[in-house]
Image (cartoon, rainbow, N blue to C red):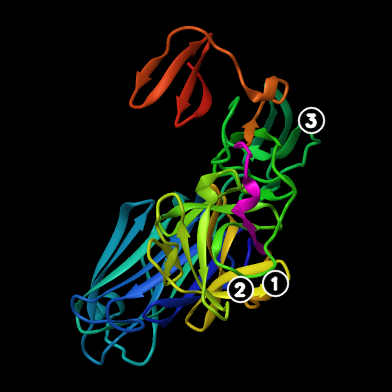
Amino acid sequence: MKLLLILLGVMTWTVESKSLVSGDGTWPYDIEVSYSNSYQKGQVRATDVAELTLGNLGGLTVEKIEVYVRSTQNKGAGRFDVTVNGSAVTSKEGTFKDWFGAYDNANFHPLPLTELPINSVSSLQITLTGTENSLYIEKYVIYWAPTEPRTVTLMRGTNVYDTMTEEHGMSGVELPKLDDEETWKFVGWCRWEFWSASSDIDIYAGGKTFYPDEDCSLWAVYRYDNSPEKVYQTTLESGEYVYVNSFDNLAMSGFSENGRMKSVYASIADVNQHYYVEFNAPGDTATIQHVKTGIYVGYSGTNLVQKKSKWCVFHKDDKTVFYMRNNNKNYVLLPGMLDENTGYYTGLQHAGDVEQASTVLTPVSVSTGLQEPVYTCHPESSQGLITVSGEGLEVNGEWIIPFGNYELIIHDGQKYLRLK
């Protein structure tokens, strides 16, 4: 379920197993949800731990938290801890009898965990640690309110192109598509301004909704396009490829960190996008290895990890989809997933029908002789590059060169301009 905003939202997470909750109600766009229990389903004995974690909440206000619990016939105790944005905010410890006046092994009762609203919530964790056998959790009910509307200032170079304000908090704004500029092609919007950079940057595509976490500015980004015409693999054979979401031309890049991978605009000249894909003889499974580092692309649960895993393969015509199964559900390896705070990334997207995915393989062999594309927020300059003079200072592997009121930062061959 996507963003459905009302004056007060209610989301309910019902425990289905020791590692799964199901959701009902309304919640913010692209929310991340995980649940774990060291014992089973919602039951917590002495020293057992059950934990619900919600991420990508977008800075909403939590008005109230209730957990529906029951006990055994004459026992049941524990401690609830509520953590917001990594910091503890409240706790409640005691026996079921302390909380409700008597033990009850038949009915679930709502236990309130908060008394005052909690503002600016991006992540929320609710932990129950058992102290006496046993407590049972049925569901978590969280009452919440959206943030105040936020304003996004769109910059084209040094000029303000437009100012957009959300209709209501957390509704997002639809980013416009701009015209191309001669040899420069418009590709999207970026949170920071630069004169020149390679493809390893976070870009928000025009025509899509952007969810600001604060009042902010975005700069139009253009690419000096020296890429070849798009070539997609139509027959499955082991080799080096770029894995691309053809819907928005975003490709998988690098290796997994914190359960996900980078997603950048596709460029077969970018070695960080090169993966060796080894198919089995029937072509229905494959392994994926990052060529530059030798690190495999694997999965654990619904997170991406650095291990060798067998991916299921769907292939038809020029479409190639890598996916895995978890709890009898399909999850597609998909570049171009959107995190409202950090931009596009590659992750595992639940998909009822993997044939609907728009992923393709571009063979690296067609990149011979190409140079890395250049990106800029200043297409009015010569290929987005600037010429500077003066001595530079090397600090922690970066070159810092004075340039008027700015400093030119050169790091790993990329150039960034920073206001002093």
> Label 2: few (<14), some or many (≥20) within 10 Å?
some
Badge nearest the viewer, 2 or 3? 3
User: Which residue is depicted at the point 29% across and 75% down?
Assistant: 99
**Which badge, 3 or 1, comes first in the chain's sequence?**
3
Pointer 2 residue: 351
Answer whether residue 117 is visible to the viewer in this image. Answer: no
Position of the N terminus by quadrant: bottom right
Q: Nearer the viewer, residue 110 or 41?
A: 41
Under mark 3, the amino acid is Glu
> Label 1: few (<14), some or many (≥20) within 10 Å?
few
Q: Would residue 394 appear left or right of 175 to someone viewing this image?
A: left
**Secondary element type, mark 3:** loop
The magenta segment:
359-372
Q: Position of residue 25 (x, y in %)?
A: 58, 71
**Secondary element type, mark 2:** loop
Q: Position of residue 88 (x, y in %)?
A: 30, 54
**Which badge, 1 or 2, comes first in the chain's sequence?**
2
Pointer 1 residue: 356
